[in-house]
């Protein structure tokens, strides 16, 4: 139910999760799409946090639960309106991700693939 975006989760890194070499190849429209995605993730997080009940907040604060268990317990308590909120945001974010991916040229896709391969080697 709760998803994470690679670009958003790595937002705090120097180049938004991308290498400097790759960032230099992005067009203005591609950078705009990344910024829109980042903005939507922030809005989703804020809207979801504002809709949480006290019980749901307690689940999030429970340090005895692991990430997966916390996520599972929390998603079980979501109301229909919270689920719908998540679905709407995810649909909008998926649309932006698709437009971004379609805008990448061969060289950019190759750089991304190379970086993912390097990253997975260290896991």
Image (cartoon, rainbow, N blue to C red):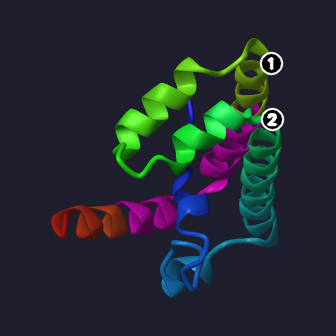
Question: Would you say residue 105 is visible in this rendering?
Answer: no
Q: Are marks 1 and 2 in contact (CB under 8 Å)?
A: yes
**Mark 1 surroundings within 10 Å by alpha-carbon count, few (fewer than 14), some (14 through 19), many (20 or more):** few
Q: x, y percentage for residue 56? A: 63, 34
Residue at 71 percent across and 61 percent down: it is 34
Q: x, y percentage for residue 31? A: 74, 68
**Helix, strand, or loop for circle 1?**
helix
> Is residue 102 covered in magenta?
yes
**Magenta segment boundaries in residue numbering:** 91-113
Q: Is residue 3 left or right of residue 100?
A: left
Q: Is residue 4 above or below residue 29?
A: above
Q: Nearer the viewer, mark 1 or mark 2?
A: 2
Q: Is residue 1 above or below residue 107?
A: above
Q: Can you tell which mark lies on residue 51?
A: 2
Sequence-first disc among 1 and 2: 2
Q: Is residue 65 left or right of residue 26?
A: left
Residue at 55 percent across and 25 percent down: it is 75
Residue at 53 percent across and 77 percent down: it is 22
How far is mark 1 from mark 2, CA to CA? Answer: 9 Å
Q: x, y percentage for residue 30? A: 73, 63
- Residue beneath label 1, please? 81
Q: Is residue 84 above or below residue 20?
A: above
Q: Quadrant of the C terminus?
A: bottom left
Q: Nearer the viewer, residue 31 or 60?
A: 60
């Amino acid at each position: 139910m709760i998803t994470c975006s690679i670009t958003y989760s790595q937002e705090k890194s120097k180049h938004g999760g991308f290498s400097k070499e790759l960032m230099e190849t992005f067009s203005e429209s591609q950078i705009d799409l990344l910024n829109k995605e980042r903005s939507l993730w922030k809005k989703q997080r804020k809207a979801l946090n504002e809709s949480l009940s006290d019980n749901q907040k307690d689940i999030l604060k429970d340090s005895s639960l692991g990430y997966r268990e916390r996520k599972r317990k929390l998603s079980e308590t979501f109301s229909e309106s919270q689920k719908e909120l998540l679905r709407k945001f995810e649909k909008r974010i998926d649309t932006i991700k698709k437009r971004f991916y379609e805008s990448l040229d061969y060289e950019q896709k190759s750089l991304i693939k190379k970086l993912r391969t390097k990253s997975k080697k260290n896991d």
